Amino acid sequence: MIVRFSIDAARRTFTPVDNRFILDYLPHADGLCVQVYLYGLMLCCAGAAGDASVSDALGLSESAVRDAFSYWQEQGLVRIRSDQPLIVEYLSPEPEEAGGVVPGKYGRLVSALNSLTAPRQFDFRELRHVYDWIEVFGLDEEAVLELVSHCMDKKGRRVSVNYIDSVAQSWSEEGVLTREKARATIERYELRRHGASAILREWNKRRKPTNDELALYEKWSADWGFSPEAILAALPKLTVSGAPNFVYLDELLDSLRQSGQTAAADIARADEADAEERAFARLVFERAGKVEPATRTQRAQISMYRTDYGMPRELLLFGAEQCRGANEPFGMMKKLWSEWHEKKITTIEGARKNLEEKSKDHRRGKQFEKPLKLQYPQHTFTDEQLSHLLVDLDKDIE
């Protein structure tokens, strides 16, 4: 049995329209979609013209009607039960405890979220958080989509809404409210994550970086100005450490920063200079007959004579050879080098001449030097004085 209003009777009745539809949905829908929704709502309420075609009644194509109902399905106000034939079920705009409809102004956002998170779909309780990200935290809809995508990349597709909620709050506090700022923030995070992961791979550690490690990497790159290449270039300096870690690396990078080495090229030049300094110091010690390696202080002193004083390498090595076999060859070297620097001697020929002059002066001093026994005061005595000094050993002493 089919019971329904006639067309004439339907014209004399009323179709109730929920004010929530008028306030939340109607302002965001185009006129065609509103026509289709209201006409279908009348059919539901009056049962009139149930066999009539909606497309014929409104003068629309069937595809246009289908698109309109698809829009309202995205808004959560209808459910399409069948396409052929088209069977549409109207839903109540009133939210229910376990689920409900989406406010019309967020319909497109929820549809985009459902596509992003498919096959997972946010339920009504979770959608309340989504609305808060916009209405409380101030993110725009595009930023919300970037937020959810970013959190799924970090935690997987089943990431909890509470976690996304905490990230949304931090973004709000940092002023990350638009898609542009969200993408910049995500790019910066990815740089930290990949950079910190690259460090761990260099140390053969197969794990994800911790939040503290990511924070350190952010400081190195954003605050101190190190490029990713520069950070990796500094890692070999930690080879002396039995267990290199981010704390040791932080101390190393701080020292490099203070010396102006924040680019990979700067670090490479400094490493090259250090290697050259070590090699030359080793050669100096070999010429002087010293077996042990030069200390850092000794290397710095040798470098001072070579770079600050501008003394040629050959001259320094010649000086080292002159000190071979001495008890304290390095001290003797420094004394000799300092003398040559003061006398502006810059060639081996000049150094040889200086040594020859010193040798001549030494020999000349030896030639005129009196024997030790002749250096005491000399006395002359008369025969009478001598007779008083003589002692008759055969005479008894009283």
Image: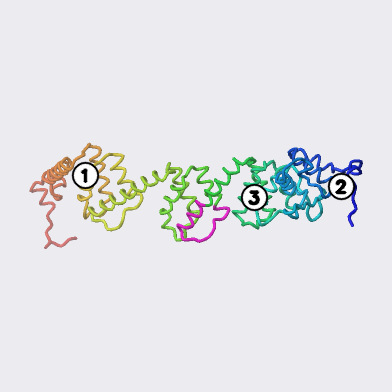
Query: From what the image shows, is residue 30 above or below residue 124?
Result: above
Q: Amino acid at mark 2?
A: Ala
> How many marks overall?
3
Label 2 packing within 10 angstroms: few (<14), some (14-19), many (20+): some
As measured in the structure, the alpha-carbon distance from the residue carrying label 3 to the one carrying label 1 is 69 Å
Task: Work out whether mark 3 precedes mark 2 in sequence or the reverse, and give the earlier one.
Answer: 2
In the picture of the structure, the residue carrying the numbered disc 1 is 315
Q: Is residue 195 magenta?
A: yes
Query: From what the image shows, is residue 37 above or below residue 200?
Result: above
Task: Work out whether mark 3 precedes mark 1 in sequence or the reverse, and give the earlier one.
Answer: 3
For the residue pair 260 and 370, the one nearer the viewer reads as 260
Horizontal side of 117 relative to 206 (left or right) equals: right
Question: Residue at (57%, 53%) from the top-left corner?
Answer: 212
Residue stretch in magenta: 194-213
Is residue 378 visible to us here? no
Task: Tell me the element at label 2.
Answer: loop
Q: Amino acid at mark 3?
A: Val
In the picture of the structure, the residue carrying the numbered disc 3 is 148
Task: Work out whether mark 2 precedes mark 1 in sequence or the reverse, and give the earlier one.
Answer: 2
Q: In x, y percent, where is residue 110?
A: 70, 48
Label 1 packing within 10 angstroms: few (<14), some (14-19), many (20+): many
